[in-house]
Image: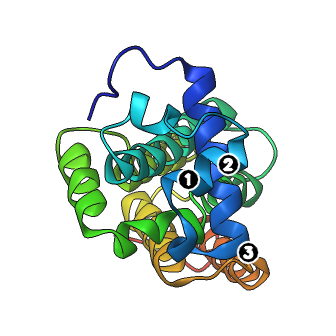
Amino acid sequence: MSPRGVATPDVRERLFAAAERVLEREGPGALTSRAITGEAGCAKGLLHAHFDGLDEFVAELVLDRFARVARHAEGLADRAGRDTVGANLLDVALALLASAGPTVAGLALARPAASARIRAALAGGAPGFGTVQEAVTAYLDAERRGGRVAEAADTAAAALALVGTLHHLLMTGGPDRTGERDRVARLVALLEAGLRPGGPSVAG
């Protein structure tokens, strides 16, 4: 899925950001090459100069946003012992909702050819939900070593519960994310209570 020629990061991000604005405003049905380049204020042929059609562009957009939040999640372990466990989990959860929000993630359902490219890339090791889940587990393990998570806590199950819920919300939610944020906050509070030493146990 490499872009044709040499696509500079500035061009890619400019087109990606323009596509997100079109999606937020008008939905997946309005996403065309002309709409994207028009929104970006650039030449009509720019998208096709760097991507092999709209399906590759969409796949690269979704993968880029997944990679962005995966990088954010991988920094969680460095925050062990700081702030609260709940605040740290909520931060990465909201970052996933924002960076790979329902409108962007829903493209995987709206364009089968793009979806196939995304699945192939993820199977080949591209960062995605699995990467985020592993990072959350590693963070909770670090907090367990520091004593802020119960020794008997099933950290992998807690990470799966969080990331699985986020995946569901991203695939089924709409552009109004207020409800999604509230539900994620309640889930994080529940997980934190179960993970806390002396709390109702999330045990293996």
- Label 1, on which residue? 34
- Label 2, on which residue? 38
Tag 1 secondary structure: helix
Given the image, on which type of amino acid does mark 2 rest? Gly
Given the image, on which type of amino acid does mark 1 rest? Arg
Query: Does residue 166 appear to the left or right of 119 in the view shown?
Result: right
Q: Position of residue 34 (x, y in %)?
A: 56, 53
Q: Image quarter for residue 97?
A: bottom right
- Residue 80 visible: yes
Q: Real-space Cα distance between discs 2 and 3?
A: 32 Å
Q: Is residue 115 above or below residue 45?
A: below
- Residue 147 visible: no
Query: Does residue 125 appear to the left or right of 133 in the view shown?
Result: left
Q: Residue at x 82, y 45 (%)?
A: 83
Q: Nearer the viewer, mark 3 or mark 1?
A: 1
Q: Real-space Cα distance between discs 1 and 2?
A: 6 Å
Closest to the observer, 10 or 196: 10
| Residue contact at pointers 1 and 2, CB within 8 angstroms | yes
- Label 3, on which residue? 181
Given the image, on which type of amino acid does mark 3 rest? Arg
Query: Does residue 150 appear to the left or right of 124 in the view shown?
Result: right
Q: Position of residue 131 (x, y in %)?
A: 38, 45
Tag 2 secondary structure: helix
Closest to the observer, 43 or 75: 43
